Amino acid sequence: MDTQKICRFCNKTFFRKASRLLHEKTCDKNILKSPIESQILQTGAGEAHDHGFQLYKSSLGGVVRDYKLQFMQRISIDWFADLNEAVTQDAYQLLQNLQHREGKLFKWYLTLEVTFRQAKNPNIITDPPAYFNTRPHEHYLGNTEEVLKNKMKVLVEKIDSYEQSGSGWVVDNFVSLIVAISKIPNYRQRKKNRVTMMITLIVTKRK
């Protein structure tokens, strides 16, 4: 066994050295980890956060953005409750904040990053993690709370399907939850602007 891929604190096995080094920084059995680092990595509301989410990627002048919530603390045995809180509370608050700042003209989807372990050998962890996506949703349609509850069901079904694939994998930990945002063009405003331009041209020609 390659000892460079085994956590020095909990003996978990990783397929890549880089993943092992990242894990060791927040390993529960690492008594040398910084208390300040532990506080920063907690999920939940913070002054510079959108209820635990931070802007992770942005492109096209902010038209497309990814907000990421890190699950750096170990999930509990009842992982459903941990995921449900992140989706129906943290993601909900992020979407409400975005709506308040920018209006409803955007669509979004969720991406959950999960590590699995072998039931027969808990030291074997999936590397890279598994990624589960939901379908995009246009924010101005439907009740956000109900939509997020449905997205939660979709993610749970995908996790269950992965575990029941026959390979012996069970949930080890959640790595991150991403809310991917893309703005929707305001076609009504565009139409209004075109009408205004046409009226202006007609008035100008008459003069």
Image: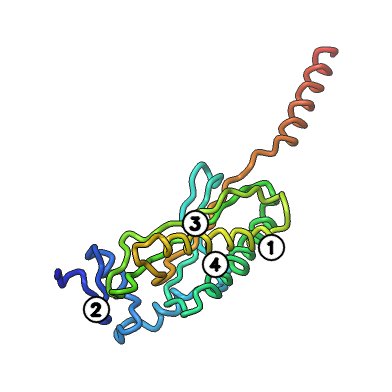
Q: Are marks 1 and 4 in contact (CB under 8 Å)?
A: no
Mark 1 element type: helix
Q: Which amino acid does label 1 sit on?
A: Glu
| Cα–Cα gap, marks 3 and 2 | 29 Å
As drawn, is 130 to the left or to the right of 18? Answer: right
Q: Position of residue 91 (x, y in %)?
A: 59, 63
* Sequence-earlier tag: 3 or 2: 2
Indicate which disc residue 145 carries. Answer: 1
Q: Where is residue 27 in the image (x, y as percent from the top left)?
A: 33, 78
x 31%, y 75%: residue = 122
Q: Where is residue 197 in the image (x, y as percent from the top left)?
A: 76, 24
Q: Which amino acid does label 4 sit on?
A: His
Q: How crowded is mark 3: few (under 14 residues within 10 Å), some or many (20 or more)?
A: some
Q: What residue type is labelled 3?
A: Thr
* Sequence-earlier tag: 4 or 2: 2
Residue designated by label 2: 11
x 80%, y 13%: residue = 205
Direction top: furthest residue: 206
Q: Which amino acid does label 2 sit on?
A: Asn
Residue designated by label 4: 49
| Cα–Cα gap, marks 1 and 4 | 20 Å
Answer with the quarter of the image where residue 47 lies: bottom right
Q: Residues within 10 Å of mark 4 (few under 14, many from 20)?
A: some
| Cα–Cα gap, marks 3 and 4 | 18 Å
* Sequence-earlier tag: 1 or 3: 3
- Nearer to us of marks 1 and 4 is 1
| Cα–Cα gap, marks 4 and 2 | 33 Å
Residue designated by label 3: 111
